[in-house]
Image (cartoon, grey):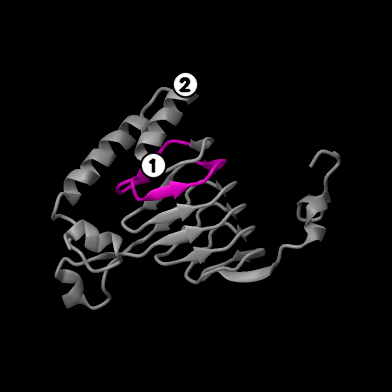
Amino acid sequence: MNQKERMLAGLPYKAWLDGLSEERLSSRKLTHRYNTMEPGNPTELTALIKKIIGKTGQEITIEPPFRCDYGSNIEVGNHFFANFNCVMLDVGKITIGENVMFAPNVSLYTAGHPVHPDSRNSGYEYGIAITIGNNVWVGGDVVINPGINIGNNVVIGSGSVVTKDLPDNVIAAGNPCRIIRAVTEADRDYYYRDRQFDVSDY
C-alpha cells in the first residue's frame, strides 16, 4: 500500500509522501479561488465547488470561506447547505446524506494523531471516516470528531463536541455531546421551542 491507500484505509500514514502534499496544494488553490470569488454569481460558485467536492447532489450551497484537505474524499447528497467557515478535514472519507444543513463554523475532523508523544513525533497520523445521515441539522460551532456516525433526522445543538455516535431521531447537545431527547411527531407544529407555526404550508 502507498501512503494514500493507507490514509483512506484508516491506517497510520505519512502525509508528505506519495503525492499527498501535491494533492493538498491543488485543493488549496481551488478553495482559494472559491473563497475569493466575487459574490453574486451562484452558477460559477456551484460549478467550482463541484470540482472541489468528490461527489455532490444537484443542489449544493457552501458559503465561502470553506476549507478542506483534499475535497475528493467528501461526498454530499442533494440539498446540502453549509454556512460560513465550514471546515472538513477529509483525510478520511466524509459521507453526508440528503437535506443536511450546517450552521456557521461547523468542523468535521477525520484527522488525528497518536496520543503518545514518541508515536506522534514519528510523523504518523490517521484519518477515520465520518458519516452523517439524511435530514440532519448541525448547529453553529459544532465539532465532529474522527470516526463518528450520525443517524437520520438528528439535530445537534450549537457549541457541541461530538465524540460518540448519535442514533436516528434525536436532539443532542453539549461538550461532550449527549442526547437530550427524541425528535417526535409533536415537534412538527413548532418552529422554535414553544412557538407554533402561524402558516399552514410547513
Q: Please say if the residues under marks 1 and 2 sit with CB atoms less than 8 Å apart.
A: no
Q: Residues within 10 Å of mark 1 (few under 14, many from 20)?
A: some
Exactly how many numbered labels are in the figure? 2
Which residue is label 1 attached to? 53
The quarter holding residue 50 reads top left
What amino acid type should be assigned to the residue bearing mark 1? Ile
Q: Residue at x 30, y 49 (%)?
A: 69
Position of 108 with respect to 158 (left or right) is: left
Identify the secondary structure beneath mark 1: loop
Q: Is residue 32 above or below residue 68?
A: above
Q: Secondary structure at mark 2?
A: loop
> Which residues lie in the magenta part?
63-83
Give how far across and how far down residue 140 sits, in percent.
54, 51
In the rendered image, the quadrant that contains the C terminus is: top right
Q: Is residue 39 visible?
A: no
Kindly report which numbered mark, 1 or 2, lies closer to the viewer in this rendering: 1
Q: Which amino acid type corresponds to the residue marked 2 in the rendered image? A: Asn
Label annotation for residue 106: none
Q: Position of residue 80 (x, y in %)?
A: 54, 43
Q: CA distance from mark 1 to mark 2?
A: 19 Å
Query: Magenta segment: does it hold 127?
Result: no
Q: Is residue 37 at all visible to an observer of this figure?
A: yes
Horizontal side of 174 relative to 50 (left or right) equals right
**Residue at 36% over, 44% down:** 67
Q: Which residue is mark 2?
A: 41
Location of residue 171 in the rendering, given as x and y in whole percent from the top left corner: 65, 63
